Amino acid sequence: MELGSMVSAVRSQRVLLGDEIRPAVILIKDGKIHQIHSDISVDVPCEVLDVADSVVMPGIVDSHVHVNEPGRTSWEGFWTATRAAAAGGVTTIVDMPLNSIPPTTTLGNFRDKMQEATGKCFVDTAFWGGVIPGNQLELRPLMEAGVAGFKCFLIHSGVEEFPHVTDCDLHAAMQQLQGTGSVLLFHAERDVQQTAEEDGDPSQYSTFLQSRPDVMETEAIRTVTELCLEFQVRCHIVHLSSAEPLKLIQAARQAGAPLTVETTHHYLSLCAENIPAGATQFKCCPPIRGSANQEQLWSALKAGQIDMVVSDHSPCTPDLKKLERGDFTEAWGGISSLQFGLPLFWSSASKRGFQLSDVVRLLSRNPAQLSRLDNQKGCLAPGYDADLVIWDPERKFEIKEGGIHHKNKLTPYLGLSLQGVVCATLVRGQLVYREGCFCPEPLGKLLLIPPERSQK
């Protein structure tokens, strides 16, 4: 079958249906899953894409991606980001409201971003709006226009055009979001009284780690839980790196807070003890912490205390990483991993007793639910979009620069050997990626999420 063509049927010995892996034929009509047959010898009146015993699963939904276009397209752009996504079995991304210029904080800025994204996306793309000081009256128009929800920072965001919010700003935003069904995402770190030495060696990772202690996340999350309980607005903590606030999160949920939380592939795959001096490609905020903390994150995932795993793909140009000086304090904080989320997760998770059904729950279904796409994404069932990742969970490969499809190739994963090779990716039944090759034209759609009508 040619790349870009519409696939009418997929047959495999290993299709993940619910929590079970079993042989099946998936019939596709008008870009949706039409029927699923358990009898793989069934006679179907169309050409069948037979993938033998490759695993067929719902495509990955990555709800935390910084595409950076317009304004910082030298860092990344819709064309390169969504190609990389397709190569990684990601069929839907949700773009963050920063680090593009302008940020997605007004209706006019959102329209600018939509215009930039049109005709450049190889996978389906939805958008988060942003909450910054003074823009509370923009939130309802942005909801009406189709953003999936909103993101804010409780600490400096790293870019001047997306300032962090105060408690007063948060109360104003919460009042706008009450009763709407929308969600507010929090970069949950807060400045606290520093106890770490400020004059440590900036080339040592430990110097940077000491400057962002766990208490910064704990205190921010304390604020989030209180707001969530008070206003009963859906809240979500992005990129949890510290296991210390998990008790706070659990207590708030038990008290009735509509609160969810994500962690990222880098917090689950990398640990502070193994970061070499000057290796600023490992810098991100919040920071990568120690191995004992990492094991606690894995335990929390297994226990259902963490709801999803995303990339937080946050690339930049190589010069901003200050590699020549190896200065962790000056380097841009962000890690590129959009293309490698599935194998990064599976390489570690499979050794810890996670099943393929857990992969779908954590990487597809729950991120789709967060971004209000769960009526069409993240599930293999009739009526859902025919977004499929076809992959080999047993096969191993090494990350090499020539195989990286992000615009900038700098990543801490270079040279890493991983388990799980993506063979093909279908977006709404269209074959967008197969064995290292892409469809000639972008076939992704821009997804606008209709606002929920208040029941009050």
Image (cartoon, grey):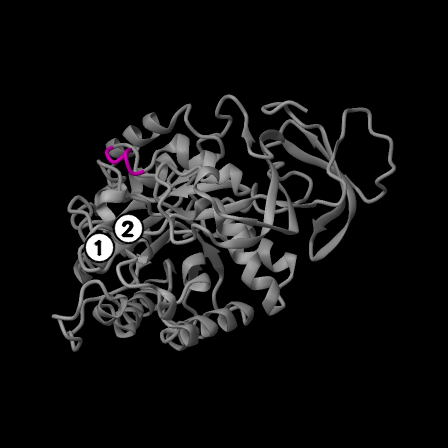
Please tell me which residue lies in front, 443 or 295.
295
Amino acid on which the number 1 mark rests in the picture:
Ala
Q: Position of residue 321 (x, y in %)?
A: 25, 49
Measuring 64% from the left and 57% from the top, which residue is drawn there?
357
Q: Which residues are magenta?
A: 71-75
Separation of disc 1 and disc 2 at Cα?
7 Å
Q: Position of residue 404 (x, y in %)?
A: 45, 40
Measuring 54% from the left and 72% from the top, which residue is drawn there?
303
* Residue 333 shows in the view: yes
Q: Disc 2 marks which residue?
A: 176
Question: Quadrant location of residue 292?
Answer: bottom left
Is residue 351 placed above or below 120 in the rendered structure?
below
Is residue 17 placed above or below 83 in the rendered structure?
below
Looking at the image, do the residues carrying marks 1 and 2 touch, with CB atoms under 8 Å apart?
yes
Residue extending farthest to the left is: 199
Question: Quadrant location of residue 250?
Answer: bottom left
